[in-house]
Image: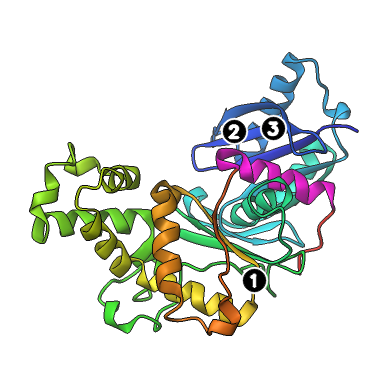
Amino acid sequence: MKLILSIEVGNKLSKVALINQYGELQLNFIVEHDLKIGLIENLHNKIIKDIKKVGYDINDIYEKIGIAIPGFVDHSKGVVKYAGILNLNNFPLKEKAEELFKKEVLVLNDANAAALGEFWIGSAKRFDSIIFYTINDGVGGALILDGKLIAGSRGFAGEFGHGSGLFAKNSQHKCVCGANGCIEKLCSSTSIINFFKEFLSKDEPSLKKHFHDEDDIKLIDIYNVYKKNIGSEKIIEFLTIILDPLIRHISLMINALDPEAIIFSGEITELKDLLIKIIQNNLKKYVVLKFYDGTPIKIAELENDAILIGSAYYVLNDWKIT
């Protein structure tokens, strides 16, 4: 079978890969954006040039191309409704890419692509129904239920990071979307780190000495101090409080959708088993116990390749998003 061309569009660069029918990357490289030329025009030119260097021609690859992109995406039309980091509004990505590549192009949101990657060959491969969270600077996600990727009526399903009113006690934290008390403002990796810095300076100065550069603390640093059993109970107490809005959100998902597993990806997974421990220990407070039944909480396995692999899977199976 021909290899699938998969593209992951990022902020300043895009990742490109040729992937086989088993989800294995046979070739991958980076394309830096050149907005003077145009996003898609530059991608097309660089991809054609780079695959020729290793003996491939555009006609040698599969008849469909997958492109994953951040933002609000109308999957059926291949239109990027809004992608703030790329300054795109109602951008006809599918149409423009098909004009240049002369192949059918399928477009999907990057979080949906990552979920499909894990569903295909990653941590979710044993399940038919999952709730997928991706938490970095922002909070996003995806829903796969009964083997179907759920996008919603406008393609916006999985925007778990936004929506106010659930966590009124935190309403003083205004999100960039304009609402108050959003999960993204409270439980993104950036927010957790900022709250932890406040925690160190105000409540636990004794822990500060174990963080060499307080201005550059990462979640993995918090985890490493925890594993050394230095103030581990205080770290658990802090994370239990900070992650409470996220845990409540997970409980709503479990009660409403009855998934087989919850999958986490992104920077938040630097907390590793500590993340799983805190969620599992506190989830029971909010979930109807008959629904819960020890729903597995798992860490994504594919890391930086998940989006590319998921985009290829989307193409290979001609997914019909619900």
Which residue does the image show at 62% across and 26% down from the upper left? 29
What residue type is disc 2 on? Ile
The answer to which of marks 2 and 1 sits earlier in the sequence is 2
Question: Please, what is the three-letter code of the amino acid marked with disc 1?
Answer: Pro
Residue at the image position 57 percent from the left and 81 percent from the top? 255
State the residue in front, 75 or 215: 215
Region rendered in magenta: 302-317
What residue is disc 1 on?
259
Give the distance between the C-alpha atoms of the residues marked 3 and 1, in whole angstroms: 31 Å
Looking at the rendered structure, the secondary structure element under dot 2 is: loop
Is residue 2 placed above or below 78 in the rendered structure? above
Nearer the observer, 204 or 171: 204
Where is residue 71? Give x, y as percent. 56, 57
Instruction: Name the residue that disc number 3 marks.
Output: 17
- Please tell me which residue is depicted at 59% across the width and 33% down the height of the picture: 37
Q: Dot 2, crowdedness within 10 Å: few (<14), some or many (≥20)?
A: few
Looking at the rendered image, the quarter that the N terminus falls into is top right
Q: CA distance from mark 2 to mark 1?
A: 44 Å
Q: In front of the other: label 3 or label 1? A: 1
Q: Nearer the viewer, mark 2 or mark 1?
A: 1
